[in-house]
Image (cartoon, helix red, strand yellow):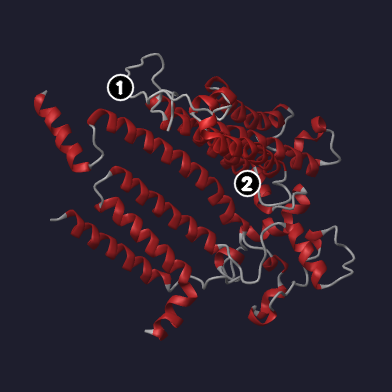
Amino acid sequence: MVEFFLNTVKPHFNFWVYVILMMVGLWSLIAKNNLIKKMMGLAIFQTAIILFYVSLGVKDGATIPVLEHYGDYAEKAEPAGPDASKPASKPASKPAPNPASMPAPAASNPADAFANPVPHVLMLTAIVVGVATLGVALALCEMIFKEFDTLEEDELLRKIKALHDDA
Amino acid sequence: MNPKIFASIAVVITGLVLLYGVSDFPTFGDPRSPANSGVEGGAPSTSLYYINESYSATKVPNLVTSVLADYRSYDTMFETVVVFAAGMAIFAILRCVGKDDGAVVAPQRKSSIDGDHNRIIVGMTCRLAVPVVQIFALYVIAHGHYSPGGGFQGGVMLGASFILIALAGNLEDALSRLSERSYMALAALGILIYAGFGVLPQVLGKNFLDYGALQKILLTDGPEMARSHSMLGVEIGVALTVMSIMFAIFANLSSRGTLKGGL
């Protein structure tokens, strides 16, 4: 059991977390009866996807993708950096807050000093759009409640069926 | 079959299939993973291009901002349009202009954050906090080039400051500061600013959203600084739309489209 965790789960724990969160969201989407709970499941599902994307962009020992923060790190690591005003041209030697835990080839590529910016960009807009679409879903729920006085799916189906039978 | 049993089976099968695929993924934090440095023997990852080249092309240290508002500007523009469309959808679903059927109107409350002695602590705290929140939001928008931040984050914060007023007092308080007419106009204005930054380069003979062409108008030293300044303009447009739509969503949802009383 312990070996399973160390060898299988630990190197990929971000993916395990995302799969488990996604299962929670999917389960409440299918199994829950209340529309609000279904939307909460949808939000959990979305969070899992966001977590998946952001964790793909993580690099060991890298800082946030803002070049000037790299400059601060570098000046602390090696004082008298001559071209501190040009951060883009100089990430040749990596700052090492904890050298023992970092992979050896990190210094060979200057891009390894910064986390991958692309997933951050993709998820930044996805979060805001997710909030806006959740608002639309809540508005629809509000109108459904106004019309049928319930948000339980089975009761809704029964009432809609009764409406059709009357007509 | 009981839907919960069916749901459990479906979820467990999906989860197991996904977990089976997890072992083929790169390990967490691997700088050599395909997403971070490209496929071995193939093309390098786009992120390497952004990290290495985007500062010299745009003079924006925050790579997320430069990728969001310049390289992927077309995408961001239509994300903003999606937010705007969501606001319009909520307006279409909930807002009952004119017809007031009485049943859904929340009881009118006299409480307000302006000079109501029953909620003096909440009112005063809110009145002290809101300007600070708004100034910080403006800082987040304007400083998005140099630190984490930008139009989306700052816009949500600005919207939250108006929602705070509505929560601490009532909806009329917030609407007296940002009326429905003005937030609708601001939401459209934000899109217009963004699209304007797209059309202006076209007028100057370049591609849509090719900010480098704006150096003739912005009178900057080169296309790099023109891109940097245009990104700020675009972020302001995004912030206006996001702020207005966030507040519109809250105002319409909390009052069931009547814009009276609120929570």
- Looking at the rendered image, the quarter that the N terminus of chain B falls into is bottom left
Q: Is residue A99 left or right of residue A40?
A: right
Choose top left, top right, bottom left or bottom right for residue B98: top left
Provide the secondary structure element on which disc 2 rests: helix
Crowdedness of circle 1 by 10 Å Cα count: few (<14), some, many (20+)? few
Q: Does the rendering let one see residue A51?
A: yes
Q: Are marks 2 and 1 on the same chain?
A: yes
Residue underneath mark 1: B103
Q: Residue furthest top?
A: B98
- Looking at the rendered image, the quarter that the C terminus of chain B falls into is top left
Above or below for A167 versus B120: above
- The amino acid type found where label 1 is placed reads Ala
> Which tag, 2 or 1, sits closer to the chain's start?
2
Residue at position x 29%, y 56% in the image: A27
> Depth-wise, is mark 2 or mark 1 nearer the camera?
1
Above or below for B226 versus A68: above
Name the mark on residue B68.
Answer: 2
Crowdedness of circle 2 by 10 Å Cα count: few (<14), some, many (20+)? many
